[in-house]
Amino acid sequence: QVQLVESGGGLVQPGGSLRLSCAASGIALFMYDMDWYRQAPGRQRELVAIITSGGSTTYADSVKGRFTISRDNAKNTVYLQMNSLKVEDTAAYYCHTVRSWRDFWGQGTQVTVSS
């Protein structure tokens, strides 16, 4: 059974930083593309960053240069380092992957950017 568990969210001031973690069980993360999505109240869930099984990364334009996705194969964990946070980054952040044509999501972790 694949499980993804996010952590690391919280309240931060504009300009601050947070690092989100996504710990996986039932799946070897290095074999799969892993994504971070976010969803703000009243808005659709949007793709934030991808790290492929080969280690290539892609970012949404809105976070490019500020967020970094990475993977620790030994810990079977994916990270999202978020710097220079803006109020508009406020959202629930979700870890996601696809295995055997099935979508797997974590429960989400809330990030609130406010002064």
Image (tube, rainbow, N blue to C red):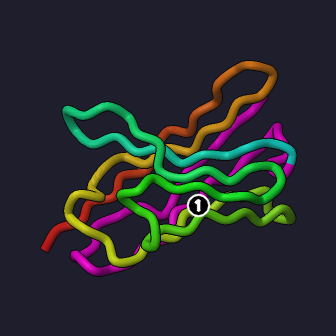
Where is residue 8 shown, x and y percent of the image? 48, 64
Where is residue 14 shown, x and y percent of the image? 22, 75
Q: Nearer the viewer, residue 83 or 114?
A: 83
- Residue ID at (55%, 63%): 80
Residue range highlighted in magenta: 1-30
Tell which residue pokes out farthest to the top in this image. 101
Q: Answer left or right for 15 relative to 97.
A: left
Q: Quadrant of residue 68?
A: bottom right
Give amino acid for label 1: Ser
The residue to which callout 1 is attached is 21
Q: Quadrant of residue 56?
A: bottom right
Task: Based on the picture, tell me whether residue 18 belongs to the magenta stretch.
Answer: yes
Helix, strand or loop under label 1: strand
- Residue ID at (65%, 42%): 4
- Residue ID at (50%, 38%): 107
Locate the C terminus by quadrant. Answer: bottom left
Q: Tell me: residue 102, above or below residue 68.
A: above
Q: Tell me: residue 58, above or below residue 97.
A: below
Where is residue 84 shown, x and y percent of the image? 34, 77
Q: Nearer the viewer, residue 22 or 52?
A: 52
Give the crowd class for mark 1: few <14, some 14-19, many >=20 residues within 10 Å.
Answer: many
Q: Nearer the viewer, residue 22 or 69?
A: 69
